[in-house]
Amino acid sequence: MSNYSTTPLGKANWNTQSARHLLNRAGFGGTTAQIEALRAMGLDGAVDYLLNSGTTQNDAISTSEFDSTIRKPLTVEERSMVQQARQSNSETVREQFQKLKNQQDGLDRAQMQEIQKWWLRRLIQTGRPLEEKLTLFWHGHFATGYRTIEDSYHMFQQNQLFRAYATGNFADLVLRILRNPAMLKYLDNDESRRGRPNENLARELMELFVLGEGHGYTENDIKEGARALTGFTFEDDTFRFAANNHDGESKTILGQTGNWDGDDFARIILSRRETSEFLCGKLYRFFVNDGPGMPDAKCNAYSNALAAELRKQQYELKPVLRMLFCSQHFYDTANRGATIKSPTQLIVQTIRELGTPPRELSSLNAAGDLMGQSLFMPPNVKGWDGGQSWINTSTYFVRQNLAVYLITGLRPDAFDWDADLAKWDTTALEAAILSATGGDSSKEADALLDLVLAVSATEARRNQFRAYVSGLTGSLTGPRLVAALCLVTAMPEFQLC
């Protein structure tokens, strides 16, 4: 029987498997040694470590990490030249500026690829797994895509915003996202002005970001919210409130009337009960169980308890996340191995868990795209659907090839002599198998399954794998371990987290 309680997990039930489940969900998995270190901290210590590691490790990001000048706006002199060219119909000047734009486009696309590799590298190497996991969550929640805004530095800025507020205050993050150049551009609010309000940002703020679709608002509330957001724009890389474009007349939003601006609009919708329930429902699907219809009627009481805590804490996320990661329900057997690894989770967890070389980051990003998740390029403003949408006949094939590539260095689209055969040091995994078996080779197959799969394999699956391993002469080390892992990663169970 499933346990739907927010009551903390008892000390007797905190063990290596519980620690592993926590690290998989609150991060991207880890080695046996890392899991044991987390287990030794105890439940409270482990959760506190994950929640607060961002404040104890010096891993600051420089704002000069990437070039902010590629998309610099035209100077007054340059704008004057363009205007004169239009008036005089000068092909020469127009060609010069078109050539400059083409150069900028090429440089910006190249920088976006570098930013993608930078974030993937950070996900792999981070000592702050929960911070990066939540940065990925917010990227899918406040979805903004490079292909629309075509400004790599603005995407980098937004990524840093999500990281800064990863475990912070949701209300503060909402107010900041309304000032974010990438979001303002993506949803056309930079073109919204008095008399001609653009409804995109107001609509998505209610439907997808704060209240949830159909939760207590009307079309008129969206229109009034759009009027409140007029004048919210940006200049270069900085938010700017264009007072001359703002509609300063009275507006009525969710029954409240006043001369509201964008901040007032955000505060009005944040005051609604639906906000906490909507957000905690998304947190539930991301961290606990993303099966169809989840959280279902039985899980709603649990999700609503998280929502009540979020309201009590005035949208501070850490207390809610602590309640979630300490709860009996989070560790219930029904919720272990109950989520499908996103492409990013699959890539990063395979590397962090097995200790394989990361190979080529550009190849990993290309694989992520083929599997349906290209960082900084969600498919639309709804973000990625997740769950069962990650798996189909095409993506499953890529997911298996990715695992083989990480384990062996062999690419499915290259000849063997083009392979990245950087040696993978299997010593740590071999030691973990030895520790689990006590040197009994007959137990090696089961030990490897238990170390790599998030859900216990069925007896039929174990018998198949035992038969395969028994055919490998010698113990599970070196090439034999590599061969066995290629088979394990082809199992449907490996796709679960």
Image (spheres, grey):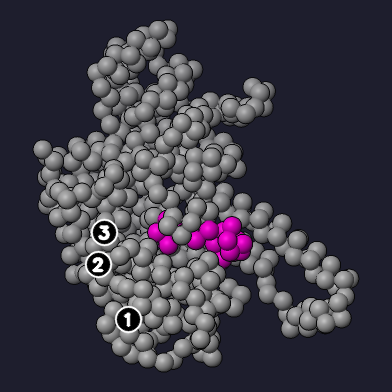
Spatial CA span between label 1 and label 2? 15 Å
Q: Secondary structure at mark 2?
A: helix
Residue 50 included in the magenta stretch of the image: no
Residue range corresponding to the magenta coloring? 139-155
* Mark 1 or mark 2, whichever is nearer to me: 1
Are the residues at dot 3 and dot 2 in contact (C-beta closer than 8 Å)? no
Q: Residues within 10 Å of mark 2 (few under 14, many from 20)?
A: some
Are the residues at dot 1 and dot 3 in contact (C-beta closer than 8 Å)? no
Q: Which residue is identified by label 1?
A: 253
Give the image quarter of residue 269. bottom left
Residue visible at 42% across and 25% down in the picture: 490
Residue 142 included in the magenta stretch of the image: yes
Q: Which residue is identified by label 2?
A: 274
Spatial CA span between label 1 and label 3? 24 Å
Residue visible at 45% across and 16% down in the picture: 480
Quarter holding the C terminus is top left
Q: Amino acid at mark 3?
A: Cys
Of 104 and 98, nearer the camera is 98
Q: Which residue is identified by label 3?
A: 280
Badge 1 or badge 3: first in the primary sequence: 1
Q: Amino acid at mark 1?
A: Ile
